[in-house]
Image: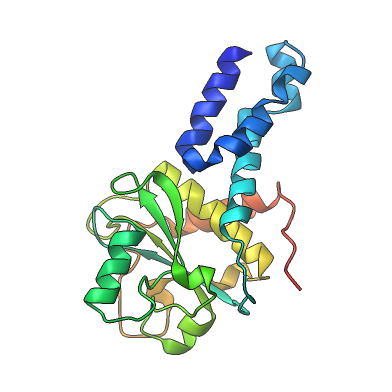
């Protein structure tokens, strides 16, 4: 049992960063109530179920806002086209080099383990204040589309890391369920009507991403929309 607890605790920290300690503690604390039989433990609750529950709690927390929510209609997936980065670095660049008052163009950034955790979801100021994005060259799209950027170059480099992909699926599924965004409106930056861009790169696994969204949706309860 201790081995299972320790292994699960380490995975939760790896997947959703140190801020999950409280939530993880609550889940792990319930384990002594289960049978000591490993077979029975697997029957009652698997490690994947535990991680999914912990992550869902975290996602709902980081997506919470203290202001009126916008009527989001799309989710647009991006890559940073850089090997390293995080929300703070991109925010500084967008403010100082682009001159954008609200800074970071995206609503969320998912780290690759360089300047933030691998799979760590960072929340931008635009999301917290429910401000339109600046992540495409289509201003109409920016008004109604949530922008999610994965750190990495998926055009000239590889694919998203396993943890990045996992976080992207969970974040996207939560947001699409909360705002009633259909699968057809979850798109790549390159699919937005604007001047041509390869973002998020030819190596981004779009088919696998959409399949994972459908599979993940079958095992969750949809979040409630604020009135």
The type of colouring in the image is rainbow
Classify residue 178 as left or right of residue 150: right
Q: Position of residue 137 (x, y in %)?
A: 36, 84
Q: Residue furthest top?
A: 37
**Front residue of 80 and 162:** 80
Question: How many labels were placed on the picture?
Answer: 0
Q: Position of residue 42 (x, y in %)?
A: 69, 22
**Front residue of 12 and 189:** 12
Residue depicted at x 60% and y 37%: 22
Does residue 227 sit above or below 80 in this rendering?
A: below
Q: Position of residue 160 (x, y in %)?
A: 37, 50
Q: Is residue 187 visible?
A: no
Q: Is residue 154 visible?
A: yes
Residue depicted at x 72% and y 11%: 37
Classify residue 116 as left or right of residue 155: right
Residue depicted at x 29% and y 49%: 115
**Front residue of 91 and 40:** 91
- Image quarter hosting the C terminus: bottom right
- Image quarter hosting the N terminus: top right
């Amino acid at each position: 049992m201790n081995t299972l607890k320790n292994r699960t605790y380490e995975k939760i920290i790896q997947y959703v960063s140190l801020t999950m300690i409280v939530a993880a503690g609550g889940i792990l604390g319930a384990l002594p109530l289960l049978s000591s039989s490993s077979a029975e433990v697997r029957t009652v609750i698997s490690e994947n179920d535990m991680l999914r529950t912990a992550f869902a709690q975290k996602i709902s927390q980081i997506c919470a806002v203290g202001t009126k929510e916008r009527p989001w209609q799309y989710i647009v997936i991006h890559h940073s086209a850089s090997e390293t980065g995080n929300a703070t670095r991109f925010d500084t660049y967008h403010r100082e080099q682009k001159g954008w008052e609200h800074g970071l163009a995206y609503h969320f950034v998912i780290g690759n383990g360089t300047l933030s955790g691998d799979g760590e979801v960072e929340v931008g100021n635009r999301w917290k204040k429910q401000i339109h994005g600046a992540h495409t060259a289509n201003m109409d799209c920016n008004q109604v589309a949530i922008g999610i950027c994965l750190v990495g170059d998926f055009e000239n480099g590889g694919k998203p890391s396993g943890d990045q992909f996992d976080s992207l699926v969970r974040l996207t599924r939560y947001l699409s369920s909360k705002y009633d965004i259909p699968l057809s409106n979850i798109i790549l930056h390159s699919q937005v009507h604007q001047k041509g861009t390869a973002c998020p790169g030819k190596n981004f696994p779009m088919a696998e991403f959409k399949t994972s969204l459908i599979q993940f949706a079958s095992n969750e309860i949809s979040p409630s929309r604020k009135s």
